[in-house]
């Protein structure tokens, strides 16, 4: 039985690694999230870097401070961010444990983009040691996020769309193919019990099932109840460079399709 369980774990890890690889090579190559020195993307790249995925992911000893898969960067303390507030805000923002902290590990502008937990050397000999970092030429010294190339959200999130917040103010309890919805200012999400997942379909999406272009809600457990949360990656797909903002639809926010997928206006 132990051998069988171990085999399942190894298979799961291998499957996840393959999924990440396929997703990355399908759209991230030569996008602004491709930080290799050989990349043709605009912005900061690192001389001698040959791997795409290693700037964000590691197969071993990943960060345990975020639910982002196998995350290879230190994430900020949730309490260090100033959260969005509004008199019309539904729900409570909960950054603690949020996968959005992974995005902010670059986009808060506090650490160099080539600062990782486990860094392979530039010659391809892997050196996975805790606290390791890339040694990639002179660009590595001042490679923090700046507003001139890509958004530097910094620590003040008061002027940004809220993340780490329950969709429709919370209260979703998926028990069928459609999730329960109490706030009519939001469109009905879809719940798939077999995936234990929620998402919001684009209005023009007629393909059954969850698609990469749909707005993904991230399942979190609150007071022993699972519900769907809005995170950075709900609207953005970091692996898809089809548009400059990495929005999930390839056509970006044409006709406000991303906004109107969730907001019933």
Image (cartoon, rainbow, N blue to C red):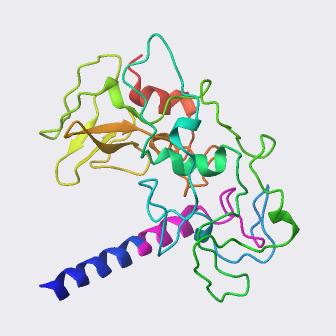
Q: Nearer the viewer, residue 173 or 221?
A: 221
Q: Residue at x 31, y 38 (%)?
A: 228
Q: Position of residue 43 (x, y in %)?
A: 79, 55
**The quadrant where residue 140 appears:** bottom right
Q: Quadrant of residue 5?
A: bottom left
Q: Is residue 219 visible?
A: yes
Q: Where is the N terminus found, in terms of image quarters?
A: bottom left
Outermost right residue? 138
- Let me know if residue 26 is in the magenta part: yes
Count of numbered circles on the image: 0
Image quarter in which the C terminus is found: top left
The image shows residue 48 at horizontal and vertical percentages of 78, 78
Residue numbers of the magenta segment: 17-38
Horizontal side of 86 relative to 54 (left or right) equals left
Q: Nearer the viewer, residue 31 or 208?
A: 31
Q: Between 63 and 138, which is closer to the camera in this rendering?
A: 63
**Residue 201 appearing in the image:** no
Q: Is residue 43 above or below residue 159?
A: below
In the image, what residue occupies the spot 83% across and 56% down? 142
Give the camera-side residue of 164 and 33: 164
**How far across and how far down the image is residue 66, in percent?**
45, 53
In the displayed orientation, state which residue is furthest to the top. Answer: 87
Q: In the image, is residue 263 above or below residue 119?
A: above
Q: Is residue 219 above or below residue 253?
A: below
**Would residue 186 be found to the left or right of residue 133 on screen?**
left
The stretch drawn in magenta includes residue 236: no
Pinpoint residue 11: horizontal percent, then vertical percent: 30, 80
């Amino acid at each position: 039985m132990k051998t069988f369980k171990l085999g399942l774990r190894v298979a799961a890890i291998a499957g996840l690694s393959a999924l990440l690889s396929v997703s990355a090579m399908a759209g991230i190559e030569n996008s602004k999230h491709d930080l290799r020195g050989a990349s043709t993307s605009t912005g900061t790249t690192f001389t001698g870097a040959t791997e795409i995925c290693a700037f964000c992911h590691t197969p071993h000893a990943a960060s345990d401070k975020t639910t982002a898969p196998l995350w290879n960067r230190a994430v900020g303390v949730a309490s260090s961010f100033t959260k969005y507030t509004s008199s019309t805000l539904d729900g409570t923002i909960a950054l603690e444990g949020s996968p959005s902290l992974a995005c902010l590990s670059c986009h808060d502008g506090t650490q160099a983009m080539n600062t990782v937990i486990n860094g392979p050397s530039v010659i391809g000999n892997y050196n996975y040691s805790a606290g390791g970092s890339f040694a990639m030429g002179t660009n590595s010294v001042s490679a923090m996020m700046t507003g001139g190339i890509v958004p530097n959200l910094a620590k003040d999130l008061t002027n940004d769309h809220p993340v780490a917040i329950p969709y429709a103010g919370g209260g979703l309890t998926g028990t069928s193919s459609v999730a329960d919805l109490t706030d009519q200012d939001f469109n009905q999400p879809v719940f798939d019990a077999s995936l234990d997942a929620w998402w919001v379909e684009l209005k023009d999406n007629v393909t059954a099932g969850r698609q990469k272009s749909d707005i993904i809600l991230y399942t979190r457990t609150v007071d022993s109840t699972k519900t769907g949360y809005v995170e950075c990656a709900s609207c953005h797909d970091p692996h898809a460079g089809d548009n400059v903002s990495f929005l999930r639809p390839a056509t970006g926010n044409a006709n406000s399709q991303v906004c109107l997928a969730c907001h019933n206006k």
